[in-house]
Image (cartoon, helix red, strand yellow):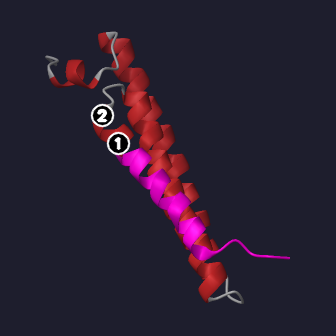
């Protein structure tokens, strides 16, 4: 069975990373910005798995990092969604521009 070359996997990971960066800097909606951060974290996970498979196929270090990052991303998403819901309840908007101009 033929393996996918490492360069193809890194290309997909780089594309995901820059799509996430573009989404983070171009969107004003907090939920879209949260999804962009998740794309960035997933591109890092792809890199960890790819380099672990190609450099150290008999070790599981990259996979442990991936599980750790997935756990951190889940906690980050839960906290961010709670903050966004609280912001929406108080100010009826999740737009970043509205959030920076709010009076508390």
Judge left or right: residue 37 versus residue 57: left
Q: Residue at x 29, y 12 (%)?
A: 91
Q: Is residue 29 above or below residue 10?
A: above
Specify the quadrant that holds the C terminus.
top left
Q: Nearer the viewer, residue 22 or 29?
A: 22
Other-residue count near label 1 (Cα within 10 Å), few / some / many at <14 / 14–19 / ≥20: few
Q: Residue at x 61, y 80 (%)?
A: 52
Q: Nearer the viewer, residue 49 or 2?
A: 2
Indicate the position of residue 8 as horizontal and vertical percent values: 59, 67
- Confirm whether the magenta stretch covers residue 39: no
Res 22 label:
1
Judge left or right: residue 22 versus residue 45: left
Judge left or right: residue 91 versus residue 15: left
Pointer 1 with pointer 2, Cβ within 8 A: yes
Taking the view exactly as shown, the residue that stands out farthest to the top is 92
The quadrant holding residue 46 is: bottom right
Whole-number angstrom distance, CA of label 1 to CA of label 2:
6 Å
- How many circles with numbers are drawn on the protein? 2
Q: Residue at x 37, y 16 (%)?
A: 88
Start and end of the magenta stretch?
1-21
Indicate the position of residue 18 as horizontal and vertical percent values: 39, 51
Q: Is residue 34 above or below residue 66?
A: above
Main SS, magenta region, reads: helix
- Regarding mark 1 in the picture, which secondary structure is present there? helix
Judge left or right: residue 58 versus residue 98: right
Q: Residue at x 47, y 54 (%)?
A: 15
Q: Is residue 65 visible?
A: no
| Residue corresponding to mark 2 | 26
Q: Is residue 99 above or below residue 53?
A: above
- Confirm whether the magenta stretch covers residue 15: yes
């Amino acid at each position: 069975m033929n393996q996918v070359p490492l360069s193809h996997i890194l290309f997909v990971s780089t594309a995901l990373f820059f799509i996430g960066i573009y989404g983070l800097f171009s969107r004003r909606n907090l939920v879209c910005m949260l999804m962009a951060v998740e794309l960035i974290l997933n591109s890092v996970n792809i890199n960890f798995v790819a380099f672990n498979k190609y450099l150290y196929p008999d070790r599981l270090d990259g996979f442990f990092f991936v599980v750790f990052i997935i756990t951190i991303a889940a906690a980050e998403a839960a906290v961010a969604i709670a903050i966004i819901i609280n912001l929406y309840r108080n100010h009826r908007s999740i737009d970043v521009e509205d959030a920076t101009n709010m009076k508390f």
